[in-house]
Image (spheres, rainbow, N blue to C red):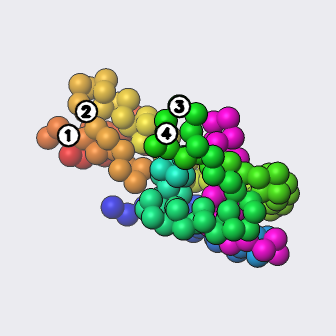
């Protein structure tokens, strides 16, 4: 599948904005004395229901193995940023909570990250229309497929019909959605 030049530009601009944000995020975290992973763990814990989260839930949030999440929690606990508490409903579970120090740190870091994200907003705003326009076209094409009784799915912004019949997208005359 070949994308339009505008779509390539949108993807490249989006990746560039992400790299800039991640580089700034790393610097913000480093200045505060925590790693990117520790910041992400504290951010996940800050958003947990009632301010607590199990190690399993944290590992799922961070896309880590259970063992890696436990190591992360151990480092955060040693730094005085996280504490463990037994679950009041399940004796087998341990709940993780940010300490007062952890809450203060994540609140400050989150504010700095939000400022940086807003600095990247113009670049993101410039790059997203071409990529989101691709998805809108795909959704429109999906409706065209559905009205013709053909099931299709979006793959990288292109509607792929499951029927042997090719369907012309009503949103882009001349562009075909092929099985």
Question: Which class describes the residues within 10 Å of circle 1: few (<14), some (14-19), or many (20+)?
Answer: some
Q: CA distance from mark 4 to mark 3?
A: 7 Å
Q: Nearer the viewer, mark 3 or mark 2?
A: 3
Location of the N terminus by quadrant is bottom left
Q: CA distance from mark 3 to mark 1?
A: 48 Å
Residue 44 in view, yes or no: no
- Per the image, label 2 sits on a secondary structure element best described as loop
- Residue 80, disc: none
Question: Which class describes the residues within 10 Å of circle 3: few (<14), some (14-19), or many (20+)?
Answer: few
| Residues at marks 2 and 1 touching, judged by CB atoms closer than 8 Å | yes
Q: CA distance from mark 3 to mark 2?
A: 45 Å
- Per the image, label 1 sits on a secondary structure element best described as loop
Q: Which residue is mark 3?
A: 89
- Per the image, label 3 sits on a secondary structure element best described as loop
Q: CA distance from mark 4 to mark 1?
A: 50 Å
In the rendered image, residue 18, in percent from the top left (x then y), is placed at 64, 65
Q: Which residue is mark 4?
A: 91
Residue drawn 24% across the image and 46% down it:
178
Question: Between disc 2 and disc 1, whose residue precedes?
Answer: 2
Q: Nearer the viewer, mark 3 or mark 1?
A: 3
Residue drawn 23% across the image and 30% down it:
150
**Dominant SS in magenta:** helix
Q: Is residue 90 above or below residue 7?
A: above
Q: Which residue is mark 2?
A: 151
Q: Which residue is mark 1?
A: 162
Magenta span: 31-53
């Amino acid at each position: 599948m070949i994308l339009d030049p505008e779509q390539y530009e949108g993807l490249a601009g989006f990746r560039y904005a992400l790299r800039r944000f991640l580089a700034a995020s790393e610097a913000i975290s480093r200045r505060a004395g925590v790693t990117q992973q520790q910041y992400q763990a504290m951010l996940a814990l800050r958003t947990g229901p009632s301010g607590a989260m199990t190690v399993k839930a944290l590992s799922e949030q961070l896309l880590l193995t259970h063992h890696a999440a436990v190591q992360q929690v151990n480092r955060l606990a040693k730094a005085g940023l996280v504490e463990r508490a037994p679950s009041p409903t399940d004796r087998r579970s341990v709940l993780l909570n940010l300490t007062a120090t952890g809450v203060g740190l994540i609140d400050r870091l989150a504010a700095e990250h939000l400022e940086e994200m807003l600095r990247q907003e113009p670049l993101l705003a410039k790059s997203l229309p071409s990529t989101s326009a691709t998805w809108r076209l795909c959704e429109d094409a999906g409706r065209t497929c559905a009205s013709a009784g053909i099931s299709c799915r979006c793959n990288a912004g292109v509607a792929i019909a499951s029927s042997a019949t090719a369907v012309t997208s009503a949103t882009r005359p001349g562009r075909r959605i092929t099985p």
